[in-house]
Image (cartoon, rainbow, N blue to C red):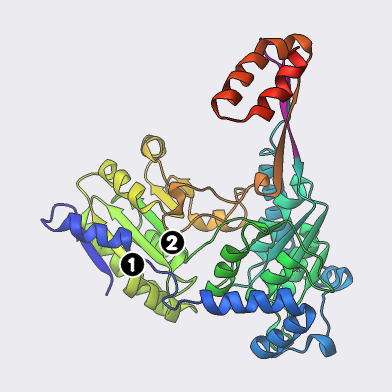
Amino acid sequence: MMLRLDASAADFAAQFSALVNDRRESASDVSVDVAAILAAVKRDGDAALADYTARFDHFDLNEQGWSISAAECAAAYDALEPKLRDALILAAERIRAYHAAQLPEDRDYRDAAGARLGARWRGVDAAGVYVPGGRAAYPSSVLMNIIPAKVAGVDRIVMVTPTPKGAVNHTVMAAAHIAGVDEIWRVGGAQAIAALAYGTEKIAPVDVVTGPGNAWVAEAKRQVYGVVGIDMVAGPSEIVVVADGKNDPLVIAADLLSQAEHDPTSQSILFTDDAAFADAVAAGVEHHIPRLSTADTMRTSWDDNGAIVLVPSLSDAIALCDRLAPEHLELAVDADEADALFAKVRHAGSVFLGRQTPEAIGDYVAGPNHVLPTGRRARFSSGLSVTDFMKRTSFLALDDAALAAIGPAAVALADAEGLPAHALSVSQRLN
C-alpha cells in the first residue's frame, strides 16, 4: 500500500528515516554469480560469450551473427516514420549542444615563482556503451550515452546490446546511426561488460563503460571498475515531486507514474503542503493506472514504493528531499518560487523547475543527460557528462629560477618523510 506520511505526526521522524534508508535494489545477491561470469569471459573469451548468449538470450552468435552493421543501422534509420525520425534528430541535436558546452578548457600558465603549470584534457581511446534489450530498450539512452562520448573526442565507441531470440529494436539501431556508434555487438548481461573490460578475440577492450542495465549488469560494472572506468552503479529509477495545490492533480499524478512505469522497484514520492491536493493526486494515480499499458508495473511500484508526504510548507520539504538525494526532483510551483526552492537544494541528480517542466522532457529532448545517480548517490556523484569520457593530464615545467624558488622546500619535505633519493633528485639540480 502506498505510504502516507504527515510531518506533524509524532512518529514522522522514524517513518521518514525508514523511507530514506529503504534499499530497493535487487534482493538477491548476484555478486558471486557475476564474478564467475566475468572470470569465464576473461578466461575463455568468445566461447564464453557464445555460451552465455545461447543460455540466457536463446540466440546463436556463431550461426546468426555477432554484430549489427552500420548498413543495417542506416536502413533502420531510413525506415523510421518521419515524425519519430525528426524527434530523434531533435533530441540528438539538443543533447549534442548541451554536452559540447561541458567541454573543459586546457590550462597553461606561469605562477609567481615562474613555474609553468597546467592541465590538458583528452578523450579516452575507446568507450563501451551498454544498451538493454529487455524491459528497458530505449533509443533515448543510446543518444544520451554515445553523443557525450563523441563530443569528448573518443576514437572508438562500442555498443553492446542483447537480442533475445534474435529480436532487434530497430529504433535503437536508428538512434545508434544518428549518434555515430562505431561497433555494435549482439551480447548482453554481465558477460557483455566482461567483454568490454577484458576484451575477447572479436571484441577489443575499452577504457570506459557506461549505460543502464539490470542488477547483473550493475554488479558487473562495479566489479570491473579499476580495469575500466564506469559512469556509476545505478539502481531503480526514482522521482520526487514538490507541488502546491495550484497544480492539476491529474498532471502531477502522471508525473509520479512517469517513473513508476520503468520498473516495479522504481519509486515516486510527492511532497505537498495541501492535504486536499494530496488526496486528489492519490485519486489521480488510481485514475491513470488502469488506463495505461504499463499498469501492472506501475501498480507494483506505486503500492510498494510510492509515498505522499504532507509538510507544513514547501520550503520544509527541501531538507527532506536532500536526505533522499533523488535522481529526479520536480519543483512544480510558480517560477519565482521554484528558483527560491532550487537555491536551497543540495542533493539531486537533475532538477525540473516550474509547473510546465515535467521530468519526462528530461528523458528525451531537453539536453541534460538522463543517466543520473540513484539510491541517494546524488549526495556524492553527478549525472553522466562529457568528462566521464575524458581524462586530465597535469604538466609542470621549471627553469633554474623557478627550481631555486621552490626546490629547497621540496628537499626539506623529502628529508622529513625519510625519502633521501627524492631530496637528492632536487638538491643536485639546485647545486
Q: Residue at x 63, y 56 (%)?
A: 226
In screen coordinates, is 17 left or right of 78? left
Which secondary structure, mark 2? strand
Chain-order first, disc 1 or disc 2 = 2
Residue at the farthest left position: 10
Q: Would you say the magenta stretch is mainly helix, strand or loop?
A: strand
Q: Residue at x 28, y 70 (%)?
A: 2
Number of marks present in the image shown? 2
Between 11 and 310, the residue placed more toward the observer is: 11
Residue 409 appears anywhere in the view: yes
Rendering coords of residue 7 (x, y %): 18, 53
Q: Which residue is mark 1?
A: 306
Quadrant (top left/top right/bottom left/bottom right) for the N terminus = bottom left
Mark 2: amino acid: Glu
Discs 1, 2 touching: Cβ within 8 Å: no
Looking at the image, is 58 positioned above or below residue 88? below
Label 1's element? loop
Residue depicted at 72% across the width and 12% down the height: 402
Going 24% across and 58% down the picture, which residue do you hit?
16
- Dividing the picture into quadrants, the one containing residue 69 is bottom right
Give, as a three-letter code, the residue at label 1.
Answer: Gly
- For the C terminus, the quadrant is top right
Residue 414 falls in image quadrant:
top right
Label 1 environment density (alpha carbons within 10 Å; few <14, some 14–19, many ≥20): many
Kindly identify which residue carries mark 2. 238
Range of magenta residues: 108-121
Instruction: Give percent across and percent down for residue 290.
Output: 40, 80
Q: Is residue 326 left or right of residue 175?
A: left
Seen as rendered, the residue at the extreme right is: 71
Q: Nearer the viewer, residue 12 or 420?
A: 420
